[in-house]
Image (tube, helix red, strand yellow):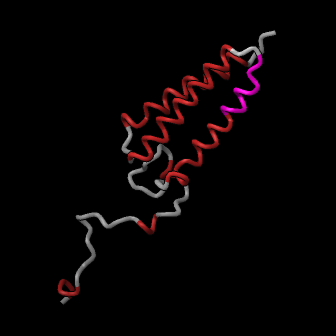
Amino acid sequence: MKYPNNTAVGATAVTLGLLTAITPAWATTTPVGAGFTLGLGAMTVLYGAWSLIARDPTRDHWALSVVGLVLGISPWVGGYAGIKPPGWPGSSALPSSRSAAQPTSPTKRPMSPKQFG
């Protein structure tokens, strides 16, 4: 018996996985961020394709859930959650635990005591 939602879930997973995997091509990111999004996007495509051809896609849907969870927490696991511009699409809207550790940009250097007087 073919599961009725199998095609919808699999096709959606393949589409979103492809979009996730190509995100580093157009978004400003770090090497770690690019690796996480490319790798997890490819895993999403793989599990989505497997769920399209599987007789019982339950295991593939659980695997897609796990990959989605890892993709959601990857900015904190990879250590690029506080990077500005965002190293992960959508991370600027999420709370950052590393925002205080941001380096000072060359154009916004702290003032020296000689500049005050």
Q: Position of residue 22 (x, y in %)?
A: 43, 31
Q: Position of residue 104 (x, y in %)?
A: 31, 67
Task: Give the residue furthest to the bottom.
Answer: 117
Task: Tell me which segment is drawn in magenta.
Answer: 56-64
Q: Is residue 70 shown in magenta?
A: no
Q: Residue at x 42, y 56 (%)?
A: 83
Q: Quadrant of residue 12?
A: top right
Q: Position of residue 74 (x, y in %)?
A: 55, 47
- Total numbered labels placed on residues in the image: 0
Q: Residue at x 36, y 35 (%)?
A: 26
Q: Residue at x 73, y 21 (%)?
A: 57
Looking at the image, which is closer to me, 6 or 107? Answer: 6
- In the image, taking residue 10 as reference, residue 29 lies left or right, namely left
Looking at the image, which is closer to me, 84 or 78? Answer: 78
Task: Give the residue furthest to the right.
Answer: 1
**Does residue 60 sit above or below 53 in this rendering?**
below
The image quadrant where one finds the N terminus is: top right
Q: Quadrant of residue 107?
A: bottom left
The image quadrant where one finds the C terminus is: bottom left
- In the image, taking residue 13 as reference, residue 3 lies left or right, namely right
Q: Is residue 63 shown in magenta?
A: yes
- In the image, taking residue 73 as reference, residue 66 lies left or right, namely right
Q: Residue at x 47, y 35 (%)?
A: 38
Q: Position of residue 20 (x, y in %)?
A: 50, 33
Looking at the image, which is closer to me, 58 or 3? Answer: 58
Task: Determine the main secondary structure of the stretch shown in magenta.
Answer: helix
